[in-house]
Image: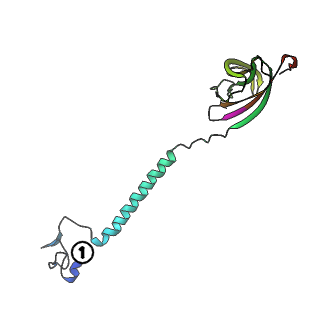
């Protein structure tokens, strides 16, 4: 029979309360005729309490770290937003005439239209005026699309009758997904005698 000594201080003849130990250093035990009968309330020896506490704390830390790691693994990775691109171009027109300065659409790989971009006038022209209208854009042999018709935004510029010279404006075009294009447009306005093809 394997006996567990629960009263280690009894090696010097006394237990923790100062009373003498009996039964050869076995605390909370009772001798019976058939042998040793231990009481049911078994207590872990104090010499094992500290190692068991360290083991339990380590298990709790490992479980917590695993839960945190799983939460981070399930979190979606944010999609990086591409930087804005800048485009500079020139347009020639006559005074007091509506002139197209840009057309904005969104053609998907299957040749259908996606959500149209958002257009913002960052820097308005000094002399003229800019307006945007909705329209239907038709095209043939555009990338893989042999023929298509999609909705679009069309921007127009109009200078006052008395204005001649250069005018400038800046338009921000923001597409779905975060792609942004900054268009810096210079409009060269001439009189009727200097009309040129656009």
Image quadrant assignment for residue 143? top right
Q: Position of residue 179 (x, y in %)?
A: 65, 35
**Of helix, strand and loop, which one carries label 1?**
loop
Image quadrant assignment for residue 110? top right
User: Is 57 situated above or below 79?
Assistant: below
- Near mark 1 (Cα within 10 A), the count class, few <14, some 14-19 or many ≥20, is some
Is 75 part of what is drawn in magenta? no
On screen, residue 16 versus residue 177, left or right, reads: left
| Residue 154 seen from this side | no
The residue that appears at 17% across and 67% down in the rendered structure is 39
User: Is 29 situated above or below 114?
Assistant: below
On screen, residue 9 versus residue 144, left or right, reads: left
On screen, residue 43 versus residue 197, left or right, reads: left
> Which quadrant does the N terminus fall into?
bottom left
| Residue 140 seen from this side | yes
The residue that appears at 66% across and 34% down in the rendered structure is 180
Q: Position of residue 87 (x, y in %)?
A: 74, 34
Q: Which residues are magenta?
A: 178-183
Mark 1 highlights which residue? 5
Which residue is farthest left?
Answer: 33
The residue that appears at 53% across and 42% down in the rendered structure is 76
> Which quadrant does the C terminus fall into?
top right
Which residue is farthest front?
Answer: 162
Is 182 part of what is drawn in magenta? yes
Q: Position of residue 147 (x, y in %)?
A: 75, 20
């Amino acid at each position: 029979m394997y006996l567990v000594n629960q009263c280690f201080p009894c090696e010097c003849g006394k237990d923790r309360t100062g009373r003498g130990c009996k039964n050869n250093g076995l605390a909370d035990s009772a001798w019976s005729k058939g042998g040793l009968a231990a009481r049911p309330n078994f207590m872990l020896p104090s010499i094992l309490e500290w190692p068991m506490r360290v083991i339990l704390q380590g298990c709790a830390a490992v479980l917590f770290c695993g839960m945190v790691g799983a939460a981070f693994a399930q979190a979606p990775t944010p999609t990086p937003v591409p930087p804005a691109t800048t485009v500079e171009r020139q347009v020639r027109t006559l005074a007091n005439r509506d002139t197209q300065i840009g057309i904005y659409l969104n053609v998907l790989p299957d040749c259908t239209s996606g959500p149209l971009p958002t257009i913002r006038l960052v820097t308005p022209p000094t002399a003229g005026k800019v307006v945007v209208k909705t329209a239907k854009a038709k095209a043939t042999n555009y990338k893989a699309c042999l023929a298509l018709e999609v909705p679009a935004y069309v921007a127009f510029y109009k200078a006052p009758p008395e204005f001649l010279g250069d005018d400038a404006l800046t338009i921000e075009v923001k597409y779905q997904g975060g792609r942004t294009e900054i268009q810096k447009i210079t409009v060269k306005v001439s009189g009727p005698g200097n009309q040129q093809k656009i």
